[in-house]
Amino acid sequence: MRKWLLILLFLVRANFLWANFYLVYFKDKSIYAEPKLSAQNILRHQRQNIAYDSKDKEVSKEYLYILSKQKCQIIGSSRWLNAACIEASEQELNAIKALPFVWKIDAFQSMLAVNLESTELGPSTLLSSSHQLQMMQLDRLHQMGYTGKGMHIAVFDNGFTRVDKQGPFQHLFKEGRIKQTRNFTDPNRSVYGMGTDGEHGARVLSVLAALMPPLFVGSAFDANYFLAVTEDMTREGQLEEWNWLMAAEWADSLGTDIISTSLGYATNFTYGGDHLFEEMDGHTTLISKAANMAASRGILVVNAAGNEGQNAWRHIIAPADADSCLSVGSVDAHGNYSPFSSQGPNYSKTIKPDVAAMGGLCITLLPQGWLKTGNGTSFACPLIAGFAACVWQIDPSIKNMNLFFKIKESGHLANHPDTFLGWGIPNADSIYYWLKGTHLPMLQNVPNQFVVYPNPSNGLFEMSYFNYSPAIQTQISIYNMLGEKIFTNELLLQNGYAIYPLNMRDLKPKKGIYFLKIEGLNQEIIFENKLVICE
């Protein structure tokens, strides 16, 4: 197995931890089992006219209870597979095989743990995300208000370091659009506190959701997000595929529309045996089965194709090989194939990848707050996932697989797909025309954009803005709940991007809600926002 993470500068220190993990499949489910349904899950099923079936029902609690009495450790259970993942000795396993409700048992085999450390990255020069959006005409969709609003995207990765602290993500927290988080590798550790291990996921999420206009704009910055850690940086093996399955079931239960993952598995396992190319047939590996089952629930699964184009493996990896997974290859800024991008077809001769986006020198945001270029299908994947969210927002009633095929058909290679880029770079205008019967308007001047963060705060705020106009003189005012002006000052908005510190602590404000207003000439209101003092 290989982690398809962009950051590959690792110093490896190995230590040994031997254990035995197994998948125990059950013959049936309790007749009393009921689906675990969230309101968003019900809405997605209704919107796509998808019936509930046995895969939506929980594993039998009675079977799990009896299994636990065999002294094995139950890692988790999967309603999609009707199975439990356990750690057990050979003696315990023999007793489990004799249980009348057990259908079969598959082994994960022994484990070798590997600790990984990544090197520190430095700041970069001024960069812009504009081109990677313009390549798919996402900027024109954004102008029309199709920014992923109302869609739900689940992102699985190795962590999301400092996303809760960075200004360009604060709009997500301010508006309550990080719906849930979960760490499937270490439940006691925050998804935001993964240190250098979680840098990759933070950068991937930035391509989707960060907002620092106009230098950096995420592909679906108005979407709702579920964030899951599934990648274990201490070891490599099928347990991570199990984590992915668990996260997919979790995201399904919460009603996600899209799963976006820049992870994949093929070779270099630290425990168990590597996958063979013969297993990359779209439906054999555990994670590819999980991806196909997620798609059967009405979820659009988007996955990086892998970065194996220049090494001995070369092929697509799981779950990008899956029949119902929209696998994403990489192009450079000129739309040319990136040599590192994994190549198809899969073992069943299905053309893969399906589409491509800019993964060559893609612009991302580091946890340290700097913009940084990066190479990898890891970054092409969230561009496509965000693209899908924006076009799906136009008509959320479209079924996931209909959208899957329309995205492919909009690609620039749709008339002659190949095994390097699939159907090519998707085109927003083509899908917009399919849905609306008219073309996207040409891009107009974008209004000034402001973000205030953190909000709520202890009185120390920052306001980031981009002024598209020449420098203008404004007045900034703050009012209390009674409408009384408690602060006023002049503010010169220079052309371009800047951050303005706003310290209300000197005013000794009480805990509560205040109102910020920025006015230009003739009392023209440029920006209004609530400020919440929490201490």
Image (tube, rainbow, N blue to C red):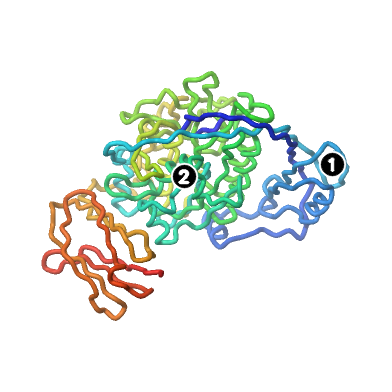
Q: Which mark is residue 92?
A: 1
- Give the foreground label among 1 and 2: 1
Quadrant where the C terminus lies? bottom left
Where is mark 2, residue-wise? 403
Q: Is residue 389 above or below residue 501?
A: above
Q: Is residue 34 above or below residue 283?
A: below
Q: Is residue 325 left or right of residue 286?
A: left
> What is the tally of numbered marks visible in this picture?
2
Q: Amino acid at mark 2?
A: Leu
Q: Position of residue 421 (x, y in %)?
A: 43, 28
Residue at screen point 28% across, 68% down: 506
Q: Amino acid at mark 1?
A: Glu
Disc 1 packing (10 Å; few <14; some 14–19; many ≥20): some
Q: Position of residue 313 (x, y in %)?
A: 55, 21
Estimate the spatial distance between the alpha carbons at disc 1 and disc 2, rounded to whole Å. Answer: 47 Å
Residue nearest the observer in this picture, 39 or 241: 241
Question: Does residue 25 show up?
Answer: yes
Q: Is residue 263 left or right of residue 175?
A: right
Which of the 4 quarters of the picture holds residue 132? Answer: top left
Residue nearest the observer in this picture, 245 or 488: 488
Q: Mark 1 touching mark 2, by CB under 8 A? A: no
Circle 1 SS class: helix
Circle 2 SS class: helix
